[in-house]
Amino acid sequence: MPYEPYDAFLLISFGGPEAEDEVIPFLENVTRGRNIPRERLAEVGQHYYLYGGVSPINQQCRDLIAAVRADFAEHGVDLPVYWGNRFWAPMLADTVAQMAKDGVRRVVAMATSAYSNYSSHRAYLDDIAAAREAVGPTAPEIELIRPFYDHPGFVEPLVEHTRAALDRLPDQERAGAHLLFSAHSIPTAMAAASGPPGHTFGPGGAYVAQLGEVARLVTERLGEDHPYELVYQSRSGPPSQPWLEPDVNDRLTELAGEGVRAVVVVPHGFVSDHMEVKYDLDNEARQTAADLGLHFERALSPGTHPRFVAMVRELVAERAAGAEPVRLGSLPADQECAPGCCAQR
Ligand SMILES: CC1=C(CCC(=O)O)c2cc3nc(cc4[nH]c(cc5[nH]c(cc1n2)c(C)c5CCC(=O)O)c(CCC(=O)O)c4C)C(CCC(=O)O)=C3C
Ligand SMILES: [Fe+2]
């Protein structure tokens, strides 16, 4: 029984609408109590309407869960798999209520989010606490798996997908291609507070350090000589508030001005090709590149890559055994789940 003390696995994700009339209620859930300008909301609503009001994220979760169930079965991991979202059905609190009804007592949970910062980590811990509170004393214990950005099961699929994207460029453009590693922008204050309290990662906090580490690890493993750098996407919030930069579109414009001819954008800040990847990269950034005459390819995110699916099981086993975490790279290990980590929104 190597998976004692757990009696269930829970995937926690963001959630997204799956019909036109779900778009506004979903956006209201996401932005409740947040300082998001009205124009930004109207604009983001349009992103969803362009795809018939359907975000790809829920289907991507269903696909990941199907793959995890098959992988658990194949490896004798006898844990039922549950799914709960922060902002759309199935809502986390409903799933926690269901687990309580099913007699589940101790849960190991994974977020569809690999990095340390308020939105990617602390928000999940807070929402777990709120969901348990709503269910009351019968709610199971829920432990959240560490940020897994530096696990080989996250990095290796990105290497493979980056190589495949390079291969899609015209032969004569491949060698000179720049790699742009793209992640969700967040307010610089949120970035600075990411990671454990008292960390020494510098002004970008653990989030920017982790993003830089994964970009380096992926580029090194390619074994080719490409310039690479970090860019950010999907900025929100009022213009007066500083967010992480450069924006992917601004950077494409500068690179084209410097004579760069081809880019591969690697969405290493994300786990699946959800709306922020589809709209902001495949639509917007691709169009920016086309207008500039740049060759543009976008690498796939990990999605349901078998190595990523296996990682889920390995992280569960690691936690169940209290084993030393499997980590690539050289960032300090004390960055996860420290009390007070990633505190600032
Ligand atoms: C770091 C990060 C991740 C990655 C980690 C993770 O995955 O958790 C992420 C993921 C996602 N963000 C998503 C959607 C949205 N995020 C918004 C707003 C915001 N995101 C932020 C940060 C992040 N977001 C922040 C600081 C805000 C400002 C408001 C606030 O301070 O909280 C808004 C409101 C409108 C807007 O302002 O854009 C929407 C609709 C979807 C679903 C996509 C789909 O439907 O397929 C996903 C996976
Ligand atoms: Fe977001």
Image (cartoon, grey):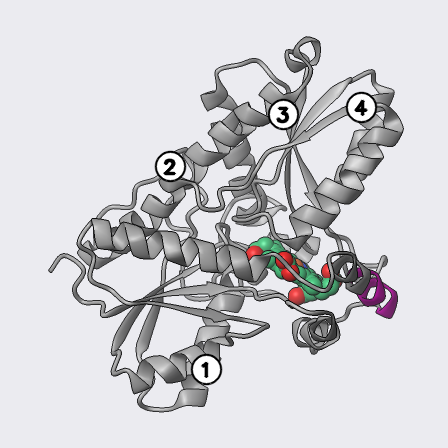
Given residues 133 and 105, the one toward you in this image is 105
Q: CA distance from mark 3 to mark 1?
A: 43 Å
Give the residue type that dot 4 points to. Answer: Leu
Residue 270: in magenta span: no
In this rendering, which labeled residue sits more in front, label 2 or label 1?
1
Quadrant where the image shows the N terminus:
bottom left
Q: Is residue 156 visible?
A: yes
Query: In percent of the image, x 59 and y 33: which residue is there?
Result: 299
Please name the residue that numbered disc 1 is placed on: 94
Give the residue type that dot 1 points to. Answer: Asp
Given residues 244 and 58, the one toward you in this image is 58
Q: Who comes first in sequence, dot 3 or dot 4? A: 3
- From the top left corner, tell me how far across and down residue 317 is, in percent: 23, 53
Q: Is residue 99 above or below residue 339?
A: below
Q: CA distance from mark 2 to mark 4?
A: 31 Å
Query: In percent of the image, x 78 and y 62: which residue is there?
Result: 49
Please name the residue that numbered disc 4 is placed on: 294
Please report the bounds of the magenta region as a residue range: 38-44
Q: CA distance from mark 3 to mark 4?
A: 16 Å
Query: In percent of the image, x 69 and y 15: which residue is there?
Result: 170
Is the distance from the Cβ of mark 2 to the nearest ligand 1 atom less than 8 Å? no
Q: Is residue 151 visible?
A: no
Picture quadrant where residue 229 is located:
top right
Q: Who comes first in sequence, dot 1 or dot 4? A: 1
Give the residue type that dot 3 points to. Answer: Tyr
Q: Who comes first in sequence, dot 2 or dot 3? A: 2
